[in-house]
Amino acid sequence: MRYEYGRGIGDYVVRPSDGLWSVAAGQVITLWDAADGGTQYTDLQDASGAAVTEVRADEYGALPRWLGPDGVTGMWADAGGPARVWVEAHAVTAGSASSTPPDWLNVKDAGARGDGVTDDTAAIQTAINAAGTTGGGTLYFPAGRYILTAALTWASGVNAVGAGPRATILQSTDPNKDCITGTDVGSITLERLQLSGPGRGFGSGIRFTRFSAPSTPSVSVRDVLIQSWGGDGIFCHQLAGAVLHRVRVRTCGGVGVHAQAPQDTVLGGASVSMTAVSVEGCVTGGIWLEGMAYSSLSACAVQGAPVGYRLDTCTGVSLTSCGAEQCTTGLEVYGGKGVTAIGFTTKGSDGTSVWLTNSAAGVVLAGVTEVSPGSGASTCLRTDAGTVATVLGLTAAKPNALSGTVNRVDPGDGSLVMVGRTVVPSGGTAARMGTAVLAAGTVTVSTTAVTATSVIMLTIQTPSGTVGAPYVNARTAGTSFVIKSTSASDTSTVGWRILDPS
């Protein structure tokens, strides 16, 4: 089995023993089995397979590609200087007797051109298949635009690394084909790439589905730009132990990032981390999680989507320092339990900033802020019947529509219970406590906090006139109630407090 050396600094490792080491143009290099003395390796082959005993640097001082002796994974290189340096093999040659594919492969060596004209689909697929046959490897995509006319079917354990999302572009031309797809795959890293679609159709940038495997585990997408797909930017079934880091998705016809966990297994759909994920101008939605559990979103942003974040029957999912701008609904929590949003901000929402519905339970909203809602905005926080939520420090620009069970801790129309005392709102149109002075034994108290089932407690604070016993004579839900005394000449000051049944 022969191992491959040379070609460029990105494809081999030189470890100097005495500081920096360089090669002069045209320098002859001999290879040895020891740092000093030892035996010279002469059983070498050049790139064409011809036998050679030494290698020669090109006019730039770069080493050519060569194959070492069978089984040798590292050699000492001697360029005629005072010391030798250690050179490691970077891959097993595909032409070796074992036919083992390389664990690090430049896709251009597999025939890809990256010139923006040539169809590179078959060449890249060949590289993926080769790496996948032994359980994995890494494909390196040098800078260039790689034209794809069909989806790349990915294999487990195969990674892809580019030169950066502005430099390495996988450009799909078929509007109804995905860019990268796979079924029952896992242990995949996609890094420093751009996945660019044709701007129409139904194809997605990344689509990983599950058929027989319990999950789609250990997927990592980092520093990737995904744009101009007719379908979703990223769609994944049953993600487990996955990471999306510095991913940008823009101008897709579907959802920007869509993680879905069908309720037919218990192992998938959990432990996903999204950090600094940005979604812009996606037609169907921003970041949607369905049936996911024990996952987090941090420093994520969605702009220009009907629903920025949709958490559908999720469990233990948290949003921290995330935001939605120019979305009809910023955050929708549809069922599930244990969802937390801390420091969530909506800006320019054109409907409802945060909407809790379908019996979502155990929702905690802390520091949620609504900024400059749009002309069509109607509600800041909407909680539907059957939902259970705790709200702390809500800053609302539009009115709230609170049904279900809402424990609200802020200067709004709920009570704040503190150690040793109860603080009840006593001013404004939604006061729950105050005083009123009887005139001829009666007084009307205006407050929107009163309901048809409110319990109103009365006590005389300052007796005056002919004192009688005060009682609630009438009420108009959401508007006012009337205090009346058993004495028509009672002019006492009466304290009142509104309590609502649980």
Image (spheres, helix red, strand yellow):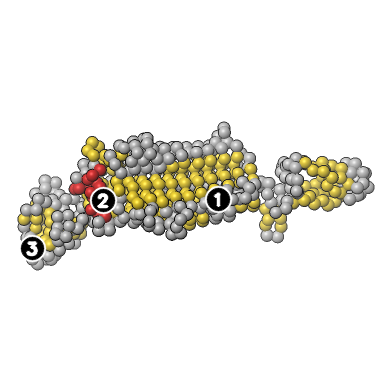
Circle 2 packing at 10 Å, graded few (<14), some (14-19), many (20+), is many
Relative height, residue 227 to residue 88 (above, below): above
Q: Which mark is residue 128?
A: 2
Instruction: Please state which amino acid type lies under the numbered disc 1.
Output: Gly
Residue that label 1 marks: 335
Q: Which x, y percent locates residue 225? A: 36, 43
- Hey, which residue is sitting farthest top in the picture? 375
Real-space Cα distance between discs 1 and 2?
40 Å
Q: Is residue 60 visible?
A: yes
Residue that label 3 marks: 40
Circle 1 packing at 10 Å, graded few (<14), some (14-19), many (20+), is many
Q: Earlier in the sequence, mark 3 or mark 1?
A: 3
Could you tell me which secondary element the residue under label 2 belongs to? helix
Relative height, residue 189 to residue 35 (above, below): above
**Quadrant location of the C terminus in the rendered image:** bottom right
Could you tell me which secondary element the residue under label 1 belongs to? loop
**274 or 8: nearer the viewer:** 274
Q: Does 43 sit left or right of 149 as displayed? A: left
